[in-house]
Amino acid sequence: MNRLVIALVGLGCAGAIAPAYAGSPVEQGRTAGTQLEVQLPDGSTMDLELRAMDTSDGPLLLLETDTCDADGYCDPSNDYASPLAASALKIDPSTATADLQTTLDGSPLAIAWRPGDGAEVGGTQVAGGSSDATATTYAGNGADVTVRWGDAACTGAGGVGNGVYGDTGPVTGDTTSDPVSAFRLPSGATVHCT
């Protein structure tokens, strides 16, 4: 399933995030996103949405996972967020071009975004409750995506554009997202681009 949506939806949500997080850190910056589908050995499926954002404090990696069994029952999503090394992310300021190189679950991860069909795209993620929450949204241009993660390689779709990220954690003292280093892919899983 591809979660790319029309840019107007993303832009509308971008305007809603800042007031919702008044008084807490809100970052804006160039953002690149894509989604992977992971087939798990027990027959369930994990949707893994990845977003990399170039913020004023440096690059940030955001992951959201949703796991659904063969009957369509889905576990609540798990969210991960961590800063990246300064050299890990490069995003062009005006085109749908970006490159991410990092490590995920002990394996090298390299994602390349290149201009696609020019369609406007975007996406939104919200996690947590009323007092401890994170949210991110972006709107931009569609991109063709190439992913290399350990032994897996695939091509799919994504987007690159301008994004907003808000986190109430510094205000409430509660954390919503786990560090990216806590993400684990089950043994025997196979990765596909969407």
Image (tube, rainbow, N blue to C red):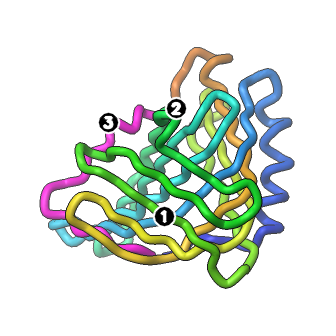
Q: Which amino acid does label 1 sit on?
A: Ala
Determine the secondary structure under disc 3: helix
- Residue at 86% over, 48% down: 15
Instruction: Decide which of tag 2 and tag 3 comes sooner along the chain.
Output: 2
User: Which percent across, then down, holds residue 42?
Assistant: 17, 66
Q: Mark 3 points at which residue?
A: 182
Instruction: Decide which of tag 2 and tag 1 comes sooner along the chain.
Output: 1
Q: In this view, does 173 lie above or below 25?
A: above
Most prominent secondary structure in the magenta stretch? loop
Q: What residue type is labelled 2?
A: Thr
145 horizontally vs 129: left or right: left
37 horizontally vs 162: left or right: left
Quadrant of the rendered image containing residue 152: bottom left
Q: In this view, does 118 lie above or below 141?
A: below
- Work out how far the residue at label 3 is from the one at label 1, CA to CA, in angstroms: 24 Å
Determine the secondary structure under disc 1: strand
Q: Mark 1 points at which residue?
A: 112
Sort mark 2 into few (<14), some (14-19) or many (20+) by Cα contacts within 10 Å: many
Q: Disc number at residue 176?
A: 2
- Residue at 47% over, 43% down: 88
> Which of the pair 55/81 is nearer the observer?
55
Quadrant of the rendered image containing residue 150: bottom left
**Magenta stretch?**
177-194
Tell whether position 127 is magenta. Answer: no
